[in-house]
Amino acid sequence: MRRHDNRGAVPIKRRWRRGDPMRAYDALPAPLRHWMAGAALPWSPASCMKIWSKAASAEEALARLERAERKMLSNE
């Protein structure tokens, strides 16, 4: 079966979201948008911003996002 979305081959459930996802993406800090553009998994702006806001610096936030993504990929 061929998928017609951007999730690729990962078995992540599809979730419906309220609001405009592109507007939420555009409101993110530039380093976070850049990280999301190259991420291996499809992240939501809300989940990324949640991790980002807990960090003391941009570097720490990006490291946290990398760890979270590695953890999710290892669970697959």
Image: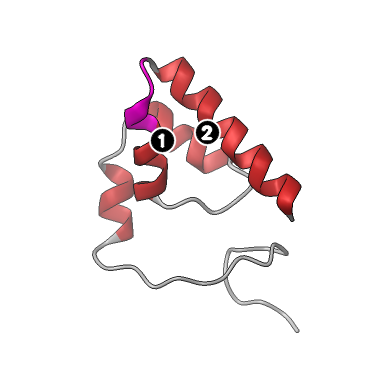
Report if residue 64 lies within the magenta region. Answer: no
Q: Which amino acid does label 2 sit on?
A: Leu
Label 2 element class? helix
Residue 41 vertical placement versus 11 (above, below): above
Give the extent of the magenta segment. Answer: 52-56
Label 1 element class? helix
Badge 1, how many Cα within 10 Å: few under 14, some, many 20+? some
- For image coordinates 74% across by 56% down, the residue present is 76
Residue that badge 2 annotates? 65
Q: Measured from the top left, where is residue 5 in percent x and y?
A: 57, 71
- For image coordinates 51% across by 42% down, the residue present is 37
Q: Measured from the top left, where is residue 20 in percent x and y?
A: 26, 62
Q: Measured from the top left, where is residue 68 in percent x and y?
A: 58, 38
Q: What residue type is labelled 1?
A: Ile
Mark 2 and mark 1 residues within 8 Å of each other at the beta carbon: yes
Residue that badge 1 annotates? 51
